[in-house]
Every structure is written in C-alpha cells, then in structure tokens.
C-alpha cells in the first residue's frame, strides 16, 4: 500500500522534500500545506525586488501551486495552516479559509521555517514598521514604497536581511539609517572583517549606528525612534530585521523534543523524537560541522538538502545529514563578504585552539584590469593545520574562493593542502598563485615556524618598552598614518640601515598587508633579530581601529573612521590627466600619483583610477601633506576614482594678479653641536611636513653633521688631514653644546630620546631627505676646512653663498643656528 506523506510548509525545505519524494516514488500520496498564499517563492530575492534589481514580481515565484501539482502530482494547499498534530492517531488539524479539518499521515515532514523576531518594544506595532519574510510582507513594503515614496528609512538589525534591505532601499533613493545593537554588523564575520563591511556601507551613504538599540517607537512627524543612547531618529518607514526564531509552536505542542537552542531536535536522518515525524530547515537544530555542538543556522542551502534527506529516508533510502558549516555570502553594494566554518568568536567560546592568518590578494593578476584586493581570514588548528573556518571580504571572486575553502573543510583538508591546490588560472580570473594558495602559504609559514606573527588586536596589550616597531612601507605611506612609535625603514633600505634597529628588543615589522613585512621579517631573522610580522599589516589595524584607544597609542590618522571624501565642486583651471592605477596594490597607486603630479602644472587635475580601497584614505592624507587638493573620491561600478588638483584650490581661485608670498624656509647650520643639529632638523622636518620647501645650508662646523662616519680615501694636504682628525666624523660623534662631559652628556641625551621614541639625529636626517629637504654644503667652508665631497653622506648638494641667498629670497623664515 502506498504511503501518505503530509508536509507543513511549502517553501525551501518543504517544497524540496515534496519534489524529491515524488521523484523517488510515483505512488506516494503527498499533501503540502502552506499557511501563506505562495509556495516555493524566492525569499532570498525579496530585498532585490524592493530595490528594483528584480523588476518583475512574477520572477520571485520560482514554482506555482499549479506547476507543482502538474509536474509532481502534489496536492498543494495554500492558505492552509496546520494547527495541531495528533501523534497517537497520526493526524493533523488544518485551518483553511475559516474551516477546520483533519488529515491522516503515515509520515509528516515539518518545514515551518523561522519567523522574524520582533522584540516587545513600545510602539513596535505602529503602521510603517515592517518585517520581511514572505511574499505578503514584500507586497506590503512595495506598496508603502510606491505609494508614500519615503525619503527616510531606518533598518533595525545588521544581519543579512538588514544589510540587504539597507542597500536596496538606498538603491531606490531612500536615505537609510541602519541601527545595530551589537558592536559590529554581520555576526558570522569577526569584528575586524565586519568593520570593512561597515566602512563600505558608510562609503555608500548608509548612516550606520552600531552598539545602540531602539527602545521606543512613537508617531511624531512620521515614525520617531528613541535609542538606548538617547539619540532620536525619524523615518517614514522602518524595517525590523533583528534575526529569526525557529517556528516550533506546533512541534512543541505535539510534545516533540526541542533542543537547547530552541529548535526542533532531529537525528542525522532528520527524524524528530517521533519516528514518523521528520523536520527540516530553519526550524531545526543542526550539528555544527566544525565543533559538533547543536546550533541554529537558518540558510536556504541546508534547508533544501535536509528536505531531500528526509524524503530519501521516508522512501527507504538511508541518507544522512552530516552537519552545517554555515557557508554564506552577501553582497554589500559592490563588496562581497562570505564565510564558512567557525569564526574566531565561536572557536573562542568553544575553547577550540586555533591560529589565524590574514592575506590580502588580488582577485586576479594585477596587470590585468579590474583586479581588486580580497582579504582572507583563515582559522586553522595549531596541531595539524586542519581548516576550521574562513572569512573573505572583497569584490570579484570571493564566492569562488569561499566555496573552494568550504569544500576543503568538507574534505577535512589542512592549510598544507590549500598550498597544493591546483586552481584554474588565466589573468582575468586569478593569479598563478591563487588567493586560496596564498592563504595556504601564509598559514603554513606560521605553522612551520617560518614566520612569527603578532595580531593587530594584540598590539594594545604589549609593553612598548620591550618592542621596537619598524614600518617597512615607503615614506609616503608612512606619512599617511602609522603605528605610534614606529620607525620608518622601507624594506628595500633595510639591509643598509639595520644598524638603526636594536638587538636587545623584540622587533615588530609591518607593512600595508603583511607581504613586505614578511620579506623584512626574513631579512631580520637571518640577521639574528627576534621578529614578529604584524599579521594582515596596517590595513588590519585600520579595520580594528574602532576598538583602539588604550594601550599602545595610535596616531590620529588611524583612529579616524570617516566616510570617503565626497567630490567637491572645484573648478580646475587646467587640464585633466587620467591615470590608470587599477590593480596596483600597497604603495603603487600613491607612488604613481607622486610621479605623475610632478609632470603636470598647477591647476591641472589627475583623475586617478584605482582598485585599492585603502587608497581613498591614503590620498587624502597625501594631499594634505603635499599641498595638493583632493577634489574628491568617487566610486564607480568597477573602481575608485580620485581627483587630485595640483596645488591648493585657494591658489587657483585667487585673483591672478595677486602675488603669492614666499613659503620657503632656509636654515643656516653653522654649529656642529649635537643639540643644535637636532633642533635644526626638527624644524626642517616640521616645515617640510607642512609642504614647505626647506633648504639647510651647512657651513663651517655644521659641515661635520654631514660627514660620513667612516674614513674615505681622498687626497688631502697635511693640514687638512690634521683638521679632519680633530673634527667629529659625522653626526654620531657630535658633542653637546653644554654638559657634554666628555661625551657622556651626548650619550645620555640620545638614550633619553630613544626612550621617549623621539627620532635620533640620524633618523631626522633621513626623514629630512625623504621629505625633500635640500641639504646644501657650503663649498667655500668645505674648501677652508679641507672637507671633500666624497666624505659627505649621500643626498647632499654642494652650493655657494649665491645658491643659499637665492633660496633665502624665496623664503619667509631664515634661521641661523
Ligand atoms: C529576505 C530573506 C532573504 C534571505 N536570503 C538568503 C540568502 O541569500 N541565502 C540563504 O542561504 N538564505 C537566505 N534566507 C534564508 C532562507 O530563505 C531560509 O533559510 C529558508 O527559506 C528556510 O527554509 P524553510 O523551509 O525552513 O523555511 P521557509 O522557507 O521560511 O518556509 C517555511 C514556510 O512554512 C510555512 N508555515 C509555517 N508554519 C506553518 C504551518 N503551521 N502550517 C502551514 N504552513 C506553515 C510558512 O508560511 C513558510 O512559508 C533569506 C531569508 C529571507 C527572509
């Protein structure tokens, strides 16, 4: 005799189970009850219908009642709510259009899903406040939007549905505020990864409020919300999207076992505590594939698979569900965030040992247009490198990489396997070392002990006295923001300048993303240093920035968290020159701007196309420091565009007849005393940082500051040789003007400066050179004192008094030290 299977719920899990049952057995009698008016609709597509990306409502209806009946011979009953289960008689009670009746079953499949959680907040039932789960909800919201044309909306909750709704409402021109009670949006991501998403939402015009919650709704000029902080918000409509709760009322009342997390308990065959009742989808508790605990993971993929498994088992096919990994993905404007497995929060909570690594790789080969960086956070076991979870934020190709890692997790693979994976490569799609391989290499390096790392979130706990921090990025990047106390030694200068790094301290090296840091790490380690590479680099520190403020102090540039500079209306007086710096990473784009700006005239504009999102911040700082004008930054579908006008906008707006005041600074350095030399260079660097042209003119004793500290073979007369012997050879040999005490005073001053993280004289000299300060040695004094050009440090020009006077005339400050 054929079986009779009743199904409660006609969408993801329910419809999937029904279709599978029929495919396996033509003779089963299948009745599917759906409380709402539609079955098998695309709940995941609902926000995009509001945002008009999905234009036709019809397209949301993946399968209709008639279609399901025709193709699968299933008795579909919409507007039919199953209200009771009589387990003893194997019957259900159904309420439909005011009528109540019973149906018998051999097997019952429950797929009632999860309902949006609406907390009992004052005023939460006012008109204009919506939740989004099904077609009826989307119709209500669509009607509101079409009829009332709201200007302002507040979305409450920063999970998947909340973020998708925020984006889609922005898409149709609504001004959106998103309020999230936790300290981050997107729970499946860890804090620092979620911050990238938050920044992107802000950049796209969403007014984002995290760490605050709505306490009260009132009708007052539309809807007024009072937040816990006391802040008030106004809106024409509100979307409540603070999460879902499994619909278990029916199961609970029938006496079926409910798990600790509040979902229906099932075994691996999707069987509930009653062998004739199966349950699937958002309403059940699943086993976490990574840590084995019971959990709730409301996702469409698992619901569909579970429906299929329940059908298999009812039809006598042994089929087992092996747990949920939580592989998920979301589009946030033009960014994509995805995750699989356990995140760091879960691993911590479960007490599972883990190591984390970060990589920032291009989505495809940098030289092929349109490559975007993607950040991969990999979590793996310290024992054997088994992959425990991954999170990726980027643009193109995030979906592919998360799926590769999700598959690797299912296969029980380790980070060593990720190193070996042979993945498809051609320039438009990937790199010869795919981002997944790169994540594997980095993780394996850590595991094998080839690289010791320190994480951005650990910086605040370190004792600054024990560490010496080296920023191995270029000077331009360093100027754009850095860890306080860090010394800038670009990686390419590291071998030459290793003497500036103390051996008695632990060394932290960092760059923008960790790659140059790793190279610096290997150089220093092989030279006997105890080194830690800052994992994920400075970019990760920026992502964490909202958490900082204590411990190691970070400079202001980093702690600022602000939207992208909007494009201002500045009428450039010159030409616009387009530069394609897409695909360039790290300092590439900014170095390109530096080179190109030198070639153009004041008032000309560089239109710089980049794909590195970090550039939008770098360019602002760079313009401020270099006296150029950032007209603004725009985001297009495929890149960021910065408009940089050479020179200050005030200048181009000024009347052409106006005479500009000289802005240069000249310093005559006559003294060869250590303290005076330090003072001279501090002033010079300060002025250079303000974008002023600075010339330091070294004469007589001041020349000693510029001498190399090693003897150089040059032809000298006897007197010149004597003179050279008596004078200090280079900056390190200089004495204090007072209290020198045979050199003890000078040593003491250097020690104190180091402790207080003040740059040494040698560092100040390097900084001055890097900042473009002109160092001019007086040719006449060199002649008198017998100092030859070869004896001077690199980067010094030789000039006469005329050269100095020429510079002085262009200056409004002239110092004699
Ligand atoms: C707006 C939105 C966007 C989403 N986006 C994604 C996404 O991008 N990716 C993803 O993986 N997941 C997404 N999800 C989640 C995904 O839709 C769910 O995980 C999936 O639909 C769960 O399937 P289910 O069968 O358990 O429940 P549902 O699909 O919710 O179906 C349950 C059905 O049961 C009916 N029902 C309940 N009780 C009864 C009863 N007593 N009698 C009769 N009928 C009943 C309900 O009316 C409901 O239609 C999204 C969900 C929403 C709401």
Image (spheres, rainbow, N blue to C red):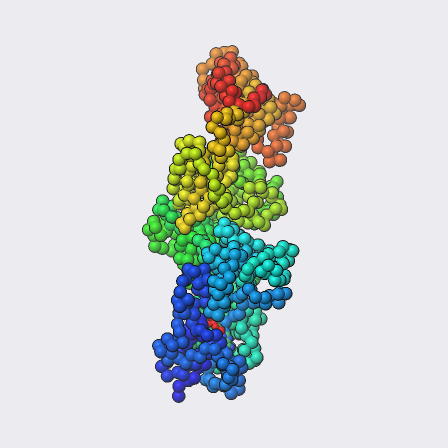
Q: Is residue 576 visible?
A: yes
User: Residue 299: in sight, yes or no?
Assistant: no
Q: Nearer the viewer, residue 350 or 648?
A: 648
Q: How many marks?
A: 0
Name which residue lies at 46% across and 56% down: 171
In the displayed structure, would residue 13 be above or below residue 431? below
- Where's the N terminus, which quadrant? bottom left
Q: Position of residue 540 (x, y in %)?
A: 51, 48
Residue 654 on image: x %, y %? 50, 31
State left or right for residue 340 relative to residue 67: right
* Near-viewer residue (451 or 486): 486
Residue drawn at (42%, 55%), measured in percent from left and top? 398
* Percent coordinates x, y for residue 244 in the rendering: 54, 67
Vertical position of residue 189 compared to residue 60: above or below: above
- Residue drawn at (47%, 14%), measured in percent from left and top? 716
Residue 505 position by quadrant: top right
């Amino acid at each position: 005799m054929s079986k009779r299977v009743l199904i409660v719920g006609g969408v993801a899990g329910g419809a999937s189970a029904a279709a599978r049952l029929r495919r396996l057995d033509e003779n089963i009698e299948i009745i599917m009850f759906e409380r709402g008016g539609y079955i098998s609709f695309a709940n995941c597509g609902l926000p995009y219908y509001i945002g008009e990306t999905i234009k036709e409502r019809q397209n949301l209806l993946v399968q209709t009642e008639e279609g399901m009946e025709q193709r699968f011979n299933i008795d579909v009953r919409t507007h039919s709510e199953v209200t009771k289960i009589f387990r003893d008689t194997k019957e259900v009670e159904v309420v439909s259009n005011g009528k109540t009746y019973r149906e018998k079953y051999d097997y019952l499949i429950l797929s009632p899903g999860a309902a949006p959680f609406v907390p009992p907040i004052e005023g939460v039932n006012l008109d204009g406040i919506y939740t989004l789960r099904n077609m009826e909800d989307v119709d209500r919201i669509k009607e509101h939007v079409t009829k009332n044309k709201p200007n302002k909306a507040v979305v409450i909750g920063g999970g998947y549905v909340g973020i998708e709704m925020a984006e889609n409402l922005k898409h149709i021109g609504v001004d959106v505020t998103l309020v999230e009670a936790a300290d981050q949006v997107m729970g499946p991501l860890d804090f620092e990864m979620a911050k990238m998403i938050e920044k992107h939402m802000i950049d796209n015009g969403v007014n984002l409020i995290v760490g605050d919650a709505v306490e009260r709704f009132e009708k007052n000029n539309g809807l007024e919300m009072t937040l816990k902080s006391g802040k008030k918000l106004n809106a024409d409509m509100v979307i409540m999207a603070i999460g879902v709760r499994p619909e278990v009322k029916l199961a609970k009342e029938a006496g079926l076992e409910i798990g600790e997390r509040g979902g229906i308990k099932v075994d691996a065959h999707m069987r509930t505590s009653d062998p004739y009742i199966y349950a699937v989808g958002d309403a059940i508790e699943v086993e976490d594939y990574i840590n084995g605990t019971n959990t709730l993971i409301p996702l469409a993929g698992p619901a569909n698979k579970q429906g299929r498994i329940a059908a298999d088992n009812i039809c006598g096919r042994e089929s087992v569900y092996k747990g949920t990994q939580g592989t998920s993905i979301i589009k946030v404007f033009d960014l994509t965030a995805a995750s699989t497995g356990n995140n760091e929060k879960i691993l911590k909570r479960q007490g599972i040992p883990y190591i984390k690594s970060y990589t920032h790789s291009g989505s495809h080969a940098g030289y092929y247009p349109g490559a975007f960086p993607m950040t991969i956070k990999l979590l793996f076991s310290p024992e054997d490198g088994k992959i425990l979870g991954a999170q990726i934020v980027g643009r193109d190709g995030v979906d592919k990489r998360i799926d590769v890692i999700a598959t690797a997790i299912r296969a029980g693979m380790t980070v060593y396997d990720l190193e070996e994976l042979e993945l498809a490569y051609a320039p438009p799609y990937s790199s010869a070392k795919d981002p997944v391989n790169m994540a594997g290499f980095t993780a394996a390096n850590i595991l094998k002990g080839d690289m010791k790392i320190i994480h951005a979130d650990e910086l605040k706990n370190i004792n600054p006295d024990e560490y010496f921090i080296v920023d191995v990025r270029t000077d331009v990047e360093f100027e754009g923001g850095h860890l306080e106390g860090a010394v800038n030694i670009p990686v390419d200068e590291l071998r030459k300048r290793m003497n500036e790094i103390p051996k008695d301290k632990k060394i932290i090296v960092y760059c923008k993303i960790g790659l140059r840091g790793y190279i610096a790490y290997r150089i220093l380690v092989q030279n006997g240093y105890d080194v830690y590479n800052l994992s994920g680099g400075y970019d990760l520190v920026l992502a964490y920035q909202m958490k900082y403020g204590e411990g190691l102090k970070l400079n202001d540039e980093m702690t600022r968290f602000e939207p992208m500079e909007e494009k201002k209306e500045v009428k450039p007086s010159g030409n616009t020159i387009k530069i394609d710096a897409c695909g360039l990473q790290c300092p590439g784009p900014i170095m390109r701007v530096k080179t190109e700006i030198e070639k153009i005239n004041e008032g000309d504009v560089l239109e710089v196309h980049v794909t590195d999102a970090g550039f939008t911040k770098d360019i602002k700082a760079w313009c401020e420091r270099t006296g150029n004008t950032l007209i603004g930054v725009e985001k297009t579908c495929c890149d960021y565009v910065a408009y940089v006008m050479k020179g200050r906008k005030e200048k181009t707006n000024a009347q052409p007849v106006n005479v500009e005041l000289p802005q240069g600074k000249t310093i005559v350095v006559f003294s060869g005393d250590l303290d005076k030399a330090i003072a001279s260079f501090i002033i010079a660097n300060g002025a250079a940082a303000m974008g002023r042209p600075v010339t330091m003119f070294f004469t007589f004793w001041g020349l000693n500051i510029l001498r190399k500290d090693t003897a150089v073979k040059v032809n000298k007369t006897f007197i010149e040789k004597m003179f050279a012997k008596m004078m200090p050879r280079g900056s390190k040999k200089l004495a204090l003007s007072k209290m020198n005490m045979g050199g003890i005073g000078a040593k003491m001053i250097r020690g104190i400066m180091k402790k207080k993280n003040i740059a040494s004289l040698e560092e100040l000299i390097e900084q001055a050179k890097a900042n473009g300060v002109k160092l001019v040695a007086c040719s006449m004094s060199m002649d008198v004192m017998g100092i030859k050009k070869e004896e001077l440090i690199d980067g010094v020009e030789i000039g006469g008094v005329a050269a100095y006077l020429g510079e002085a005339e262009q200056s409004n400050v002239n110092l004699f030290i």
